[in-house]
């Protein structure tokens, strides 16, 4: 089982496109590490560099303690499964799964034993004598996975292996992949753009955007305590409410997050108060998931936003309310577009989210924050500045009604204007 270490790895494609920007990342022996991010963010590029299918432009790749930048793919002991796990059409499932062992001239008894065991684990033991053309999509993908893993490689790389399957099959196979790779103990790097898949499968998740690593941690760390605004937004199943607030410390009695028409008081007894107060007079970003907001009665003593329900939206298992509150929303800050970047020739270091040191500098020396403009863009039922509030299974509000939205202040997520955390995440 391999450890995989990327040390400051960059990838520039011909034409100067910086697909991966100085990425440092580690997968431990036997770990299931998920690479998560939107389409085009560079996940497959990372996987292909680890497999040796793509040259590394700068930085080092270490496989099991050995510098691997120049190792041939066949010398890396890596198996890979893609979206469309290709199978030999004229071989049966058994023939496909046995093939990698047969060309390695393995003992036929061992081949039989491995194929039988693995096909049972993958629940395709009843299809072993069938050809790929007669299988369902899910069965084909299981067979492809079986063929990749039958050699018992040190490292298993999976590139969106479930994305062509229907929802039910995805959930089923997801659970099986999880138990299979864990029972084999093989280090696995798994690429997906689906946050539910990542949260449910991973030991740890690495979130990537525009070729820049945003965060790495266990599913509950990156979900509950995200290092960047991008991570918070990408992992929200419903749209993240991201609001701009000016930090104030009136008469030094408490810290206030001033949203214009509303404010939230953070008492000095709150452990976050001192870190936030370093931004006094500046704007920070406040992230609130829809389930941190809830209808509250007049007697509620915590922070409240007053608003009016503009629309209610039914999602089957829950209702969401779109509430006009007069608080402008802001866009999630992103790294600069890679098309405008050339490797190693970025603007000033402080303008680039380069991890903890840079964000610590920003925390200590906050820059003048940009002014966020309140736009009213209409997209479907949602207006950009609506607060999204989760109501649960009953629509306790009516459209047009004035409402009190209670805020769970303990679950505020606080970010600098360029999306790094104000109060450091615990890792
Ligand atoms: P993801 O797997 O996250 O969807 P990729 O790693 O496939 O993203 O691609 C990252 C970026 O690099 C994309 O913008 C893609 O267009 C670009 N890219 C990928 N392969 C090449 C290539 N061979 N030449 C030039 N650009 C490429």
Image: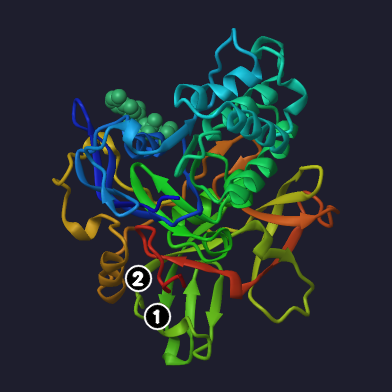
Residue 386 visible in this rendered orientation of the protein? no
- Ligand 1: give its quadrant: top left
Looking at the picture, does residue 354 appear above or below residue 84?
below
Q: Position of residue 4 (x, y in %)?
A: 37, 50
Q: CA distance from mark 1 to mark 2?
A: 13 Å
Residue neighbourhood size for the residue with mark 1, other residues' Cα within 10 Å, grouped as few (<14), some (14–19), many (≥20): some
Q: Position of residue 59 (x, y in %)?
A: 21, 48
Q: Nearer the viewer, mark 1 or mark 2?
A: 1
* Lower position in the chain sequence, tag 1 or tag 2: 1
In which quadrant of the rendered image does the C terminus lie?
Answer: bottom left
Q: Position of residue 5 (x, y in %)?
A: 33, 53
> Is disc 1 in contact with disc 2, using a CB cutoff of under 8 Å?
no
Pick whichever, 44 or 238, lies toward us: 44
- Residue lying at the far left in this picture: please name it: 345
- Residue lying at the far top in this picture: please name it: 90
Disc number placed over residue 282 in the picture, else none: 2
Residue named by callout 1? 275
Q: Position of residue 426 (x, y in %)?
A: 47, 72
Pick whichever, 238 or 143, lies toward us: 143
Looking at the picture, does residue 210 appear above or below residue 359?
above
Q: For the point 78% across and 24% down, which residue is it?
A: 126
């Amino acid at each position: 089982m391999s450890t995989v270490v990327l040390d400051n790895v960059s990838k520039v494609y011909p034409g100067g496109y910086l697909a991966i920007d100085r990425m440092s990342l580690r997968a431990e022996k036997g770990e299931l590490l998920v690479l998560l991010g939107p389409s085009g963010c560079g996940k497959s590029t990372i996987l292909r560099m680890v497999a040796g299918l793509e040259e590394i432009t700068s930085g080092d790749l270490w496989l099991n303690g050995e510098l691997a930048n120049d190792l041939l793919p066949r010398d890396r002991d890596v198996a890979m499964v893609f979206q469309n796990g290709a199978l030999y059409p004229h071989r049966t499932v058994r023939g496909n799964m046995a093939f990698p062992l047969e060309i390695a001239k393995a003992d036929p008894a061992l081949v039989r034993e491995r194929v039988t065991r693995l096909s049972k684990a993958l629940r395709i033991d009843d299809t072993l004598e069938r050809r790929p053309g007669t299988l369902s999509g899910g069965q084909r993908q299981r067979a492809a996975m079986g063929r990749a893993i039958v050699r018992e490689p040190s490292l298993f790389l999976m590139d969106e292996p479930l994305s062509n399957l229907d929802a039910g099959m995805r959930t089923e196979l997801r659970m099986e992949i999880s138990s299979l790779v864990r029972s084999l103990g093989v280090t696995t790097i798994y690429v997906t753009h689906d946050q539910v898949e990542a949260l449910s499968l991973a030991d740890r998740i690495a979130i990537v955007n525009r070729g820049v690593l945003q965060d790495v941690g266990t599913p509950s760390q990156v979900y509950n305590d995200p290092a960047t605004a991008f991570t918070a937004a990408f992992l929200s199943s419903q749209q993240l409410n991201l609001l701009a607030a000016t930090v104030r410390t009136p008469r030094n009695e408490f810290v206030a997050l001033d949203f214009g028409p509303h404010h939230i008081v953070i008492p000095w007894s709150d452990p976050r108060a001192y870190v936030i107060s370093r931004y006094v007079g500046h704007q920070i970003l406040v992230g609130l998931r829809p389930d941190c907001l809830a209808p509250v009665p007049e007697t509620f003593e915590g922070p409240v936003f007053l608003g009016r329900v503009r629309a209610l939206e039914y999602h089957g298992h829950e209702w969401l309310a779109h509430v006009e509150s007069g608080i402008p929303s802001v866009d999630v800050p992103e790294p600069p577009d890679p098309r405008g970047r050339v490797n190693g020739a970025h603007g000033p270091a402080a303008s680039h989210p380069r991890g903890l040191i840079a964000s610590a500098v920003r925390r200590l020396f906050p820059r003048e924050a940009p002014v966020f403009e309140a736009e009213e863009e209409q997209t479907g039922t949602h207006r950009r500045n609506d607060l999204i509030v989760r109501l649960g299974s009953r629509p306790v509000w009516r459209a047009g009604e004035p409402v009190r939205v209670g805020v769970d202040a303990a679950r505020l997520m606080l970010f600098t204007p360029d999306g790094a955390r104000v109060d450091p995440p615990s890792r």
